[in-house]
Amino acid sequence: MNYLIGCGGVGSAIVPSFCRLKAPQEVTLVDGDTIEHKNLDRQMFDAGQVGKNKASALAGKFGCHALPQWFSRGSLRLTRADWLLCLVDNHRTRLEAIESCDEHGCQAVFAANETHSAEAYYYRRAWKGTPRDPRVYYPELLTDRSGDPRAAAIGCTGEAQERNRQLVSANLMAAALAEHLYVLWHWKAPRLDRDTVERLPHKLVANLTRLETHTLAGRLA
């Protein structure tokens, strides 16, 4: 199963093409959030969907499965064959997705963006503790708890999201980068020899003036 975690700006942008890339019955959307009017300028929903769960609204349109709940480590029954596409905007959920890969052997692609920039990166259990581990090149993953949507239960309201309002163009770029890495590592890499795999990008970054490709051997500007 392919679990798309987060159906906001990046998640709602990737679902239409991903459900053509993979059969919809092989896709499950995971998000506990509700569509609000303030989402409509940068997320792929319309006014008639306000008040509905984001995962359920998208699943109803594109024919995939929905889990209208927040993701956390242990919330899904994962196997080595599963893939996680983590499309959220908080480090807490990203960390728990990485830890889920470590525990179950599944693989993951992550997408993130700011106002104008976007990036995506790939992770597998064999990379734990190496320079290719996101916890190594983004150590703040281990300590940053801001923006966790589950914190709403204790009075937080997602203020981090309001401070970092992404343009819809950045959401679309992050979705495209993530989908590219998925195709590369899910379909292409298993058919390639080891030397070629070592040159494949595991991280892609785009901003207003520059594109960066990070391979297993180093960064290519």
Image (cartoon, rainbow, N blue to C red):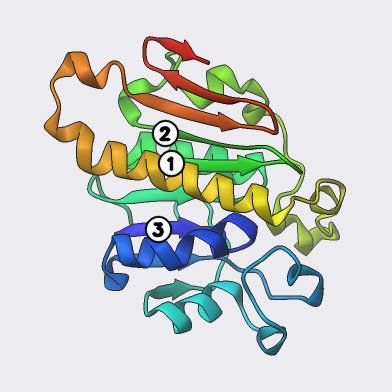
Mark 2 residue type: Tyr
Secondary element under disc 3, as helix, strand or loop, is strand
| 17 or 132, nearer to the observer | 17
Of pointers 3 and 2, the one earlier in the residue sequence = 3
Mark pair 1, 2: CA separation: 4 Å
Secondary element under disc 1, as helix, strand or loop, is strand
Q: Position of residue 25 (x, y in %)?
A: 28, 73
According to the picture, the residue beneath numbered tag 3 turns out to be 3
Q: Is residue 67 positioned above or below 213 on the image?
A: below
Find the residue positioned furthest to the front.
209
Q: Position of residue 60 (x, y in %)?
A: 46, 84
Labels 1 & 2 near each other (Cβ < 8 A): yes
Mark 1 residue type: Val
Labels 3 & 1 near each other (Cβ < 8 A): no
Mark pair 3, 2: CA separation: 14 Å
Left or right, residue 144 beside residue 24? right
- Tag in front: 3 or 2: 2
Q: Position of residue 170 (x, y in %)?
A: 66, 47
Left or right, residue 177 beside residue 65? right
Q: Residue at x 45, y 77 (%)?
A: 59
Mark pair 3, 1: CA separation: 10 Å
Of pointers 3 and 1, the one earlier in the residue sequence = 3
Mark 3 residue type: Tyr
Q: Residue at x 53, y 53 (%)?
A: 72
According to the picture, the residue beneath numbered tag 1 turns out to be 109
According to the picture, the residue beneath numbered tag 2 turns out to be 122
